[in-house]
Image (spheres, rainbow, N blue to C red):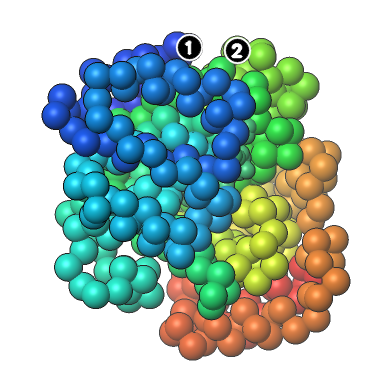
Amino acid sequence: MKNFEFKNPTKIIFGKGQIEKLSQEIPENAKILMLYGGGSIIRNGIYEQVKEALSGYEVVEFGGIPANPEYSVLMDALKVIRDKNITFLLAVGGGSVIDGTKFLSSAAEYEGETPWDILAQKIPTTKAMPFGTVLTLPATGSEMNSGAVITRAETKEKLGMGGTGLFPLFSILDPQVIQSVPSRQLVNGITDAFTHVLEQYMTYPSGAILQDRFAESILQTLIEVGPKVLDDPTDHVAASNFMWSCTMALNGLIQKGVPTDWAVHAMGHELTALYGIDHARTLAVITPSHYKFNFETKKEKLAQYAERVWNITEGSLDHKASAAIEKTEEFFNLMGIDTKLSAYTRDYHGTAEEISKRFKERGWTGLGEHQSLTPDDVQEIVKRAY
Ligand code: NZQ
Ligand code: ZN
């Protein structure tokens, strides 16, 4: 196990009916900007619950943050923060609204001229406007981590940011919110969380016995409850376990002391930036191809995953490792997720070269747990995912 430090300051308030606790968590004299997406919260009643809980506060609203939060929209929200002297941000939504809010919390305190530099120049956020979240869609783990991903349509870019200042002060997780989530987004949530675990697990053995078992138990839970939430989102046991699995998949715990990969996300983000494909679906496209390409360096963990998660106990190590890749792809396919790029766009020719070129330009010349994946390798992996 590698040396590590671990601190996660986000307070989680979990369970049915917990949105009413909002007022206990926000400073009394706060001037709040409530941020949300395209309006699902108005249709499903979460908006009402939040407004009622905030009745004693001065609240300004900013709706319309799109999926894959868009920089130009967020710049409009930044103007509201400045014009209205906002002191506290409240995100009510899924990963996109929460990430957009994180960007704003950072940009509000940023002293440079162009907030895009926070992303383009990878400036870590240590000082930020305080914010909390009411999660409406389990998937990204953004509700309990310090990362965000922002899209800029103008340049077809999608870049990450982070820093110790970007942990939410609190996040309210009421599993009942999933009842209104369309099945396409539930499937995305299961797939995103599943891949988050894989990115922190599918590397090489590092003597982190407990972290491996944390990771495997999240995967097993997602495999068990995923089909149940799709079948009946009112099943509270399934919904609670789904929601908590998504949070635990990316709140920092399982990545401590272990090597991590994250190349699947790096390539996936480009597919969203270029073609607007849902984040989770880009991961399902890249994952099988990435594991096949990196088979030799990942096969020990692939075989361990095969045995412990998929119960494949027969055959050689290579056989188990290959079967694990097949099982993973099958799991995505069974939920209705296509795992080939050509299923999402007819324009896929040249994609691999374009992504490889972008990585070269950004100096991303060594991805993966060994920092050894070159832009040429990336080109090959994306090509094999066509
Ligand atoms: O915009 P509204 O109307 O709210 O509708 C949303 C949106 O259309 C809808 N939705 C959310 N909650 C709902 C609901 N519909 C009905 N009932 C509810 N309760 O779902 C749609 C998708 O929402 P979005 O927030 O985009 O989904 P998700 O949570 O999957 O977030 C994806 C974004 O997070 C980033 C992704 O790249 C993408 O931009 N990620 C963030 C990470 C992080 N901060 O740690 C890590 C991830 O790997 C990921 O990159
Ligand atoms: Zn993800």
Residue 112's label in the rendered image is none
Q: Is residue 310 above or below residue 262?
A: above
Residue ranking furthest to the front: 83
Position of 242 with respect to 118 (left or right) is: right
Disc 1 is placed on an element classified as: loop
The front one of 92 and 186 is 92
Choose top left, top right, bottom left or bottom right for residue 50: top left
Label 2 packing within 10 angstroms: few (<14), some (14-19), many (20+): some
Q: Is residue 35 above or below residue 111?
A: above
The amino acid at mark 2 is His
Residue found at x 73% / y 33%:
183
Q: How many marks?
A: 2
Residue found at x 35% / y 17%:
53
Choose top left, top right, bottom left or bottom right for residue 348: bottom right
Disc 2 is placed on an element classified as: helix
Residue found at x 24% / y 53%:
83
Q: Which residue is mark 2?
A: 236
- Labels 1 and 2 touching (C-beta < 8 A): yes
Residue found at x 70% / y 79%:
352
Spot occupied by residue 148 in the image (x, y as percentages of width and height): 41, 54
Which quarter of the figure is the C terminus placed in? bottom right
Ligand 1 shows up in the quarter that is: top right
Position of 8 with respect to 291 (left or right) is: left
Residue 297 visible to the viewer: no
The amino acid at mark 1 is Lys
The front one of 298 and 83 is 83
Q: Which residue is mark 1?
A: 16
Spot occupied by residue 290 in the image (x, y as percentages of width and height): 67, 65
Which numbered disc flags the more N-terminal residue, 1 or 2? 1
Label 1 packing within 10 angstroms: few (<14), some (14-19), many (20+): some
